[in-house]
Amino acid sequence: MKQVVQNYKSGELALLDVPVPGCKPDGVLVRSAYSLISTGTELMKVSEAGMSMVGKARSRPDQVAKVMQSVATNGVPATYRKVMGKLDSYTPLGYSLCGVVEQVGAGIDDVKVGDLVACAGNEHALHAELNWVPKNLYTPVPEGLAPRHAAFGTVGSIAMQGVRQGQPQLGEVALVIGLGLIGQLVVQLLTAAGVRVVGADPDPARCALAERLGAAACGDPASPAVEAAVAELTAGHGVDQVYLAAGGGSNQPVELAAQLSRDRGRVVDIGKCRLDLPWNAYYEKELDVRFSRSYGPGRYDPAYELEGRDYPIGYVRWTERRNLACFLDLVARGSVDVEPLISHIADFDAAVETYQRLKDGDLKAVAVLFRYPEHTEEAQEAAAPAVAVPAVKLRSSSVPASARALKSPVRLAFIGAGNYATSMLLPHLTQRDGVKLSTVVTTTALSAANAKRKFGFEEATTDLDAVLGDKSIDAVFVVTRHSSHAELTKKALHAGKAVFVEKPLALGEDELAGVLAAVEESGNDRIQVGFNRRFAPLLQEARKRFGARTGPASVRYLVNAGRLQHGSWYLRQGSEGTRFAGEGGHFIDTVSWLLGADPISVYALATPGNEDLQVVLRYPGGSTATISYVTSGPASLPKETLDLVADGKALRLDDFVRASVFLDGTAGRKRWVSSRLPKARDKGQEAELAAFVRAVRTGGPMPVPLESLVATTAATVAVQAALAGGAPVTLAEAR
C-alpha cells in the first residue's frame, strides 16, 4: 500500500510503498476514502523538517534537553546513533480521515466490515491507504453524512474540546484569534451554542469566510475594526471568552486577548502560539487562562487510546471518542458546515506535489483533502492475503546437528524495529560479514519500511506467519514490547528458528514455563536473551585481571535507572510488567556471570510505590549480591556502578567507562586501572551479536547456556513474589 511520509532530517516528502498493517485485537483495519491535511499543524511539521539542524534544535528545546540527558547517561556515540536514527527515518503525516472498515479485530462489536467510520490519531489516522485504528479512536459515521465531510472529525474534535474549555453560555460574546481551519470550526461551534463571535485574522478572505459561517464581525487584529466590534457587542465591557487558534512566534494574540477581555474573562489556548503573558494586564483583570488538550480527555493516555479502556460517562462526559461522535452529529444535522472550508481536493497519488504547493504558497487553502482510489474488487483481492492473519500452527522441528557451511550467510529476520533495535542491534549487524538481513516484520507498516530502507532488509512486512514459515530464514530476533516476548519466542522455536530475544524472556512464571515447554516440544533450545553486559570488553578485561576466586564474594550493584517520561509504555505495568521485570535481568545476569553461578534465592525491599528497589541475591558458596535499582537519583549520577569484593581483592566498574581491580599480593598493594577511557560506553552488544551469529552459522553452543538464561529470568520474576510476601524466595519456589 502507499503512505505519505517525510524524512525529518532532510525534509524529503515521499509517497512510499509500505506493508499493509496487521489487524490487531481491539481495533479495526480501515481503507481510507478521504483524509484531511491540517494546514496548520502538518505544515508546521513539514516546515520544521526543512530547517537546518540548528533551526530544528531552536524549534524543539524540549528535545534538545532529552538529548543532553541521554549524552550524560549513554555517552556521545550511542546518543548520536539514536538521534540520527530517529532523524533519518520516515515519519508519518496525517491524523484525520474517513474510511471503510475492511477487517474487524477481536473484541470489536460496534462496527462490521463495510461500515463507514471516522478515525483520529497521529499514529492511526494517517495519510495511508490502510490504517489500523484502536476502538476509542474511531466512531461510526451518521447515515447520510458524506465521507469527505466525515474526514473533518479529528480537527472538529480539537475545536470542540477548545470550546468546551471555554464553557460558553447563551448570549455571551467570544473573540476567536486566528481563522484558519480550527478557528473557522470554533466560530461555527460557538455560533451553534448561541454565542456571538468576533474573529481576528490578517487574511481578508478568511475573515469573509468566518462572517459567512456565522461570525458577527471579523477584521485584521492590527486594525481598530476588531476593537470597535467588541465594544459594540459588549457595551464596552469586553468579551467573555477568547480562543487562541493562531500559530507563529508573535505575542500579539495574547496581548490582544488581554486588551479585549472583560474582567475575569476566560482565555483558551488551542493553537501553538507564543505565550508571553503581559503580567499586569492579566493580573489586573484576573483573567482565567486555560489550555485545551487536543481532541479531549483520553488524549495521551495509552490505557484509553491503545488499550480501549473508556472513561465512565458519569465521571468524564466528553472523551476523545464522544467528542468525535458529537462533532459528526452536528455536521450531519447541518449545525456545522464544513463544505465551504474545503479549498482543494487532491488525488492521493498527487500527495507530495500537494504538500509542496502548500509549503511554497502556490496553494492557498483552509482545508485540503486527499481522495483515495475507489474500492474496486481487484484492490480488495490484492489486500486480502496481508489482512487475513491465521494463527500460526505449532509443529515439532529439530535443529540440524551438523554445522552450517561457513561460506553461506546467516539469514536473519527481525520482529520489531523500534529504537533499541535500530540504534543498538541493527547497526552492528549491517557491518558484519556473513550476515544477510532477510525480513523485518512490524505491526506498523512505516516502521518496517524505515528499517528496510536504512538497514538493507530484503523484505518488509506485517505478516508474522510468512516470516516464521520461510525456511530460508535461520534466526529470528524478537525486539518487541515485553508482553509479547514469550509468545513470539515459542512460535519461533516451534518454527525451527534460532531465537535472539531482547530481555526479558518472560514476565511471569507461566510465561517462562510456556517457553520451556516449547523447547521440549520442538526439540529446539537455540535461544539467546539480550543480556549483553557480560560481553562488554571493559568488564571482560576486569574479570580477567581479577582472576580466580576461592572464597565467597560480596557484590554491590547500583543502577541509577532515572525517571521515565510520562506516557512511556514501560509504565504500563498491567500489560508490560514492572519496570524491574523488564530490565532487571540485565543486572542479575551480570552478577551471575561474574560469580560463575546462578542465584539460589531472592529477597527484595521497596520504597513506597515500588519505585526504588533493593534486591538481595544469595549464591552457592555463601556469595551475596545487592542490586540497588533506583529511579529517584539525579541525572548527573552515573547509571551503573558495580563493586565485587572477595579473597582480599576488589573489582570496580564505573558505568562502562572505567574499570579498576585492587589486588593485595605479597609484594605489596597492586592496582590495575583501565589504561584509557573507551570511545563509548560499550555494553557488549556488538560482541554478543557476533557470538550469536557465530553459533547460528557453525551450529555450535549458544553464547549463554539455556539453564543460565532460565535461572536469571526466574530470579527476576521472583523479585515481585519476594516483595509481595516480605520474605526470601528460593528459585525452586519461584519456578
Image (cartoon, grey):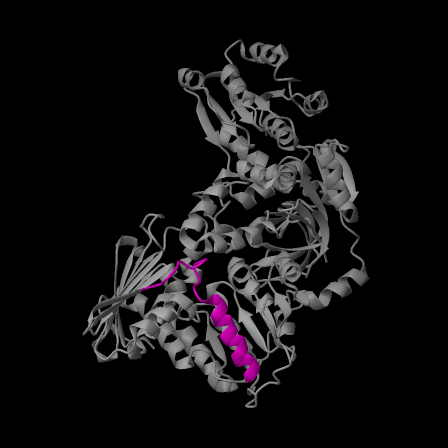
Residue 275 part of the magenta segment? no
Residue 696 counted in the magenta span = yes
Where's residue 435, x and y in %? 61, 73
Q: Which residue shows up at 35% across the image and 63% down it?
A: 674
Numbered label tally: 0
Viewer-nearest residue: 668 or 572: 668
Name the side, left or right, on which 674 lies relative to 40.
left
**Relative vertical location of residue 396 with respect to residue 727 in this rendering, above or below:** below
- Residue range in magenta is 673-698
Report which quarter residue 586 is drawn in: bottom left
Q: Position of residue 118 (x, y in %)?
A: 65, 47
Residue 629 visible (yes or no): yes
**605 or 451, which is in the foreground?**
451
Vertical side of 451 occupied by 356: above or below: above
Task: Tell me where residue 685 appears, x and y as whole percent.
Answer: 47, 66
Q: Nearer the viewer, residue 253 or 98?
A: 253
Q: Quadrant of residue 130?
A: bottom right
Residue at 73 percent of width and 38 percent of height: 368
| Quadrant including the C terminus | bottom left
**In the displayed structure image, the side of residue 528 where residue 604 appears, left or right:** left
Q: Nearer the viewer, residue 58 or 471?
A: 58
